[in-house]
Image (tube, rainbow, N blue to C red):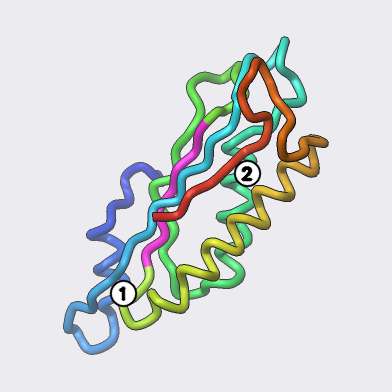
Amino acid sequence: MLKSIRNTTALAILALCSGAALAANTYTVTIEGPGGHSNGDYGNVNAVHAGARAVTALGQVLLDAVIASMKGGATVNAIAADCTFTVTVADDKAAAAKPVIEKTVSEAIAAENAFRGVKKGDLVRGAPAEVRATVK
């Protein structure tokens, strides 16, 4: 269902008031981690779990935002190494929304890393062990 939601749908939802289309700004959140196989790498941070934490928190602080297109992971028996989703807000709220998105995603990332006992600088197979995120 989430895959079928597109930014055009988000724009239509934001344009409900006067019948005139409102401009919107869409941010893409990308979360990356080491991933792994669910057997040998059990306990690694999971990018989709971090993404779910972020989406849940964003839904509580950005009530007007449209959060869509969440995807990540490769297969059922793998720890997801990636997760992306979009956050669409009206242009008049975009400047205030971006720092909120960045802070909320950062807190979700920190929560996933803490839950798994991962600290900055830890390595898994020579790569960073923690999940990291960018908001563009």
> In the rendered view, would you say 129 is above or below 5?
above
What label sits on residue 50 in the rendered view? 2
**Which of the two discs, 1 and 2, labels the residue nearer the N terminus?**
1
- Report the residue that reaches farthest toward the left: 20
> In the rendered view, would you say 47 is above or below 63?
above
Q: Quadrant of the C terminus?
A: bottom left
> What's the residue at 38%, 70% (across, down)?
89
For the residue pair 27 and 64, the one nearer the viewer reads as 27
Q: Quadrant of residue 106?
A: bottom right
Instruction: Name which residue type carries label 1.
Output: Leu
Give the extent of the magenta segment: 82-88
> In the rendered view, would you say 25 is above or below 73?
below
What label sits on residue 93 in the rendered view? none
- Report the residue that reaches farthest toward the top: 40
Instruction: Name which residue type carries label 2.
Output: Ala
Left/right placement of residue 87 relative to residue 37 reads left
Inspect the magenta stretch and tell me whether residue 128 lies in it: no
For the residue pair 75 and 104, the one nearer the viewer reads as 104
> What's the residue at 51%, 28% (across, down)?
73
| Residue with the mark numbered 1 | 14
Q: Where residue 76 sits: x, y (%)?
A: 56, 20
- Report the residue that reaches farthest toward the bottom: 18
Left/right placement of residue 5 relative to residue 19 reads right
Q: Quadrant of the N terminus?
A: top left
> What's the residue at 77%, 35% (across, down)?
118
Q: Residues within 10 Å of mark 2 (few under 14, many from 20)?
A: many
Q: Secondary structure at mark 2?
A: helix
> What's the residue at 37%, 64% (across, down)?
88
Q: Where residue 57 sits: x, y (%)?
A: 63, 61
Q: Nearer the viewer, mark 1 or mark 2?
A: 2
